[in-house]
Image (tube, helix red, strand yellow):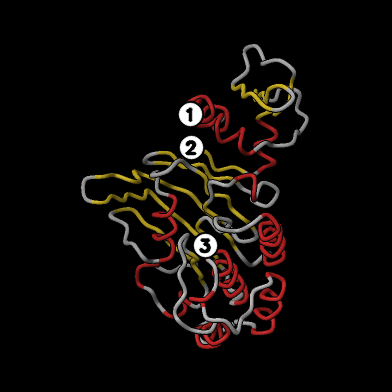
Amino acid sequence: MVTIDNLHFSYSRHTVFSGVTMKLEAGKIYGLLGQNGVGKTTLLKIISGLLRVKSGSCRVMEHNPFSREPGFLGELFFIPEDFVGPDMEVNKFARLRGEFYPNYDENKFSRLMTEFEVNGNEKFTRLSFGQQKKAIIAFALSTNTKLILMDEPSNGLDIPSKAQLRRVISQASSDETCIIISTHQVRDLENLIDPIIILDKNGVLLNATIEEISKKLCFELRALPGEGAIYNEPALGGYIVVDKNTSGEECKVNIEGLFNTVLLNKKLIKDIFNN
């Protein structure tokens, strides 16, 4: 679906990516994690064709994204973090924009709007930020594109809406689609995203499936810190302890604990996953 090879990108003198290489496959819901400023949104914009790579390559569905060919644009939808809709009724917006997407499903859009409890007869400008976000997510999923990019989709949503978001994204995923979600709110999407990509300044620290992670690392809640463990984090009831998985048994991955472990043990984690 997405092939990135030796990618370099910078804003003026600020280098964002230096020699990034990875492949993203159909049938997955990728979680794109990283601290502020490491390039999560930049990567989504490169994949969607909004930014041009400086050197190296990014191919999406065999297209050069920056060429912005109609056949490419009709199979991709990018939801930015801060979406502000036009002064137009939501249903009219969906009807007009839906004509650009060959697989747009108006009935699906209506169903998702009902599930999100958003009135499509209202103008975007009369909706709250959270309602606007839900409306554009409903439209994006109704386009049935092969690739959907979401930048912080749970921001601005209340707790019931986050549960609805997880459900509709899960339902939208198929063997033919690829969904990439950039997020800081890992707890909102913890049981949804797989594989996990963790970005660092200039590169990728980790790109692995939940299964691969659980075979390499063990996550436990203990009463006391783990002596000699890779990472310890205070938590309710004790400590989250992350260490190498020496038993061979798979364990449940704590994504927030994983993120902190990776950031504080970059070289060690790379060594563990490269061996």
Query: CB of mark 1 within 8 Å of CB of mark 2?
Result: yes
Indicate which disc residue 266 carries.
Answer: 1
Along the polypeptide, which appears first: circle 2 or circle 3? Answer: 3
Which of the two marks, 2 or 3, is nearer to us in this view?
A: 3
Residue 128 x, y percent position in the rendering: 54, 68
Residue beneath disc 2: 205
**Would you place residue 60 above or below residue 212 in this image?**
below
Residue 27 image-quadrant placement: bottom right
Look at label 2 and name its amino acid.
Leu
**Would you place residue 185 above or below residue 273 in this image?**
below
Is 221 on the left-hand or right-hand side of 125? Answer: right
Give the spatial CA distance, label 3 vs label 1: 27 Å
Along the polypeptide, which appears first: circle 3 or circle 1? Answer: 3
Indicate which disc residue 149 carries.
Answer: 3
**At x 40% / y 48%, what residue is drawn?**
39
Which of the two marks, 3 or 1, is nearer to us in this view?
A: 3
Residue 188 x, y percent position in the rendering: 64, 49
Residue 53 x, y percent position in the rendering: 32, 57
Query: CB of mark 2 within 8 Å of CB of mark 3?
Result: no
Task: Provide the secondary structure element on which disc 2 rests.
Answer: strand
**At x 65% / y 11%, what residue is drawn?**
227
Direction top: furthest residue: 227
Q: Residues within 10 Å of mark 2 (few under 14, many from 20)?
A: many
Is 227 on the left-hand or right-hand side of 82? Answer: right
Q: Residues within 10 Å of mark 3 (few under 14, many from 20)?
A: many
